[in-house]
Amino acid sequence: MKQETLQTDVLVVGGGGAASRAAYEAKHFDPGLDVTVAVEGEWGKCGSTVWVASEALGINAPLNAAGDGDSPEVFLDDILETGLGLANRSLAEKIAFESSDRISELVELGVEFDSTNEKIRQRKLSGCTKARSLSQGGQTGVAIVSALKRASLEKGVNVLEGIRIVDLIHKDGEVWGARGLRQGEQIDILAKAVILANGGAGAIFPHNINHSSLRGDGYSMAYRAGALLTNMEFIQIGPGVVFPKMHFIIHSHMWRFSPRLKNSLGKEFLDDYLPTGTSRDEVLSLKAMSFPFSVRTNARYVDISISKEIMSGRGTEHGGVFFDVTHVPEGELREKAPVTYETFIKRGINLCADRIEIAPLVQSFNGGIKIDENAATSVPGLFAVGEVSGGVHGADRPGGNNLADCQVFGYRGGRAAAVLAADRAWKAKEAIRDDKLIVMENSEKIAPIRNAIDRALMVVRQKEDLEELLDKIQSFRHETPTLDVVTDNVLLTAEMVARSAILRQESRGVHYREDFPDSDPELTKSSLVNKGKEGEVKAFFE
């Protein structure tokens, strides 16, 4: 395999909202630095920020445009309350008190948020007590990334497209670059500062709503370099469309129509899972205020019932259940859920006449690489921003905070990396290795493990399934002496999540242990993962 070596001052890995902000800020802060974005696909057309369509996709900031008394202090309280004791207060403060400035800068860069009578319109999303989410139709992420990409290129940021970064260049506990693959060629990129902004790991799950590039590469690279990761068991999962095949989540607006959920036998099943004294209307009303699964409210029974029906073999042909709103007048649906209505009309589906199939889909990871206030990790030379980072959210998060996280910590991480790169003496060439990446294709062999991931790490978790997944991972490693780096990244990520999920013997936020259904007040502490002395994945509490 051909091998090439490149050099830059600041390397940003990824091409979504966090990566775009970090690259822009690094170059804006120090125009003399060489800043390079390395993205697997085309910058601006891959990653979570631009991939998911939704009626309620937005970015939070306490602008108080609705005049409902919002403020940074109220926003902070919402973050901490929703995080259920596990959101890092210092990081949460940065989002609460700095997101408004980041919004103002986006507007200056050309992002036109939805408005009424020339006044920005804000909505209240799940986990928020005030209306603070801004959007641009159903394409908020696209608008943000497009503006930042355009501004970055104008400032002279370099871009390497079509390269998948799979490992870090590190020596003596410091990071000095990254290694990637592009069209059968290995490319080593030396850098004084590396910013990981390559998202989460939703694509390792068979049922997900993520771009195919989100396979846990960032988590695994950081782990091998010696970084700490935190709260990896907390993964946001919610109902999304599995047929017709499209990246679309069923957000709060649609649950207000009191949909009928039916299994492959045509039976409505939600009532079968409700405890005595809990009504279907109550549960659906709560679901209308919260897209992702969480044990915080009785809305949990929607996700649990769907999961149990599918796991019990009563799912549809495409692995979901039927979602039926054919009883809703077309005018009402068009008026109250216009993005959803039009999205399906373009696919030739009229929700007032046709059923669709939905299932729990992985949306995003709340945990990730542990960072400080400037997005620095525990490894010198390495920063992490966006979904790949951890500590910002907690056991749950307010809707709209992922995009806010990307902008606030993309800003902070980009500038901090620029400061480091300007002062750091080059040692990268001493860290580069002569060995070549192994790129054997193991995708077919790993299919049984992905199925085990889907069973063990989705909505309903229990020790037996988690241990079975770990056994399959260990067996695969034993039976595959030559393991390619791409497959190793999938296995490492799955193992970090599974060991964290086994460690947390309780249910909290988006983590539901069927064998430990209640929250434990003694476990209001974050989980951590790192590489043990014997090379094992070690999970423990902070």
Image (cartoon, helix red, strand yellow):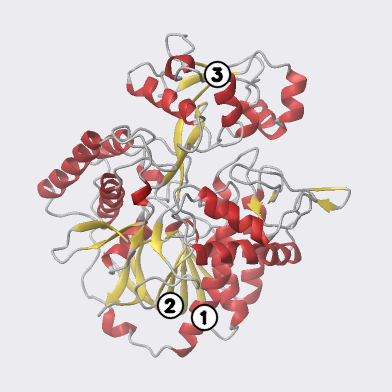
**Can the viewer see residue 425 in this picture?**
yes
Question: In the structure shown, which secondary structural element does the residue marked by tag 3 occupy?
Answer: helix
> Residue 418's mark?
1
Residue at the spot x=51%, y=32% of the render?
Answer: 240
**Rendered location of residue 337, percent (x, y):** 70, 30
Count residues near mark 1 (Cα–Cα under 10 Å), then give few for <14, some for 14-19, many for 20+.
Answer: many
| Quadrant of the drawing holding the C terminus | bottom left
Front-lying residue, 512 or 201: 512
Q: Is residue 365 left or right of residue 442?
A: right
Q: How many marks on residues?
A: 3
Q: Residue furthest front?
A: 521
Q: Is residue 188 visible?
A: no
Crowd class of label 3 (few under 14; some 14 to 19; many from 20; radius 10 Å): some
Q: Quadrant of residue 389?
A: bottom left
Which residue type carries mark 2?
A: Ala
User: Which residue is at 64% across, 52% downward?
Assistant: 59
The three-letter code of the residue at mark 1 reads: Ala
Which percent across, then down, holds residue 440?
23, 52
Mark 2 and mark 1 in contact? Answer it, CB < 8 Å: yes
The quadrant of the rendering that contains the N terminus is: bottom left
Q: CA distance from mark 2 to mark 1?
A: 8 Å
Dot 1 falls on a residue whose secondary structure is helix
Residue 19 sits above or below residue 65 on the image: below
Which residue is the site of mark 2? Answer: 193
Residue on which the image places disc 3: 280
* Type of amino acid under label 3: Arg
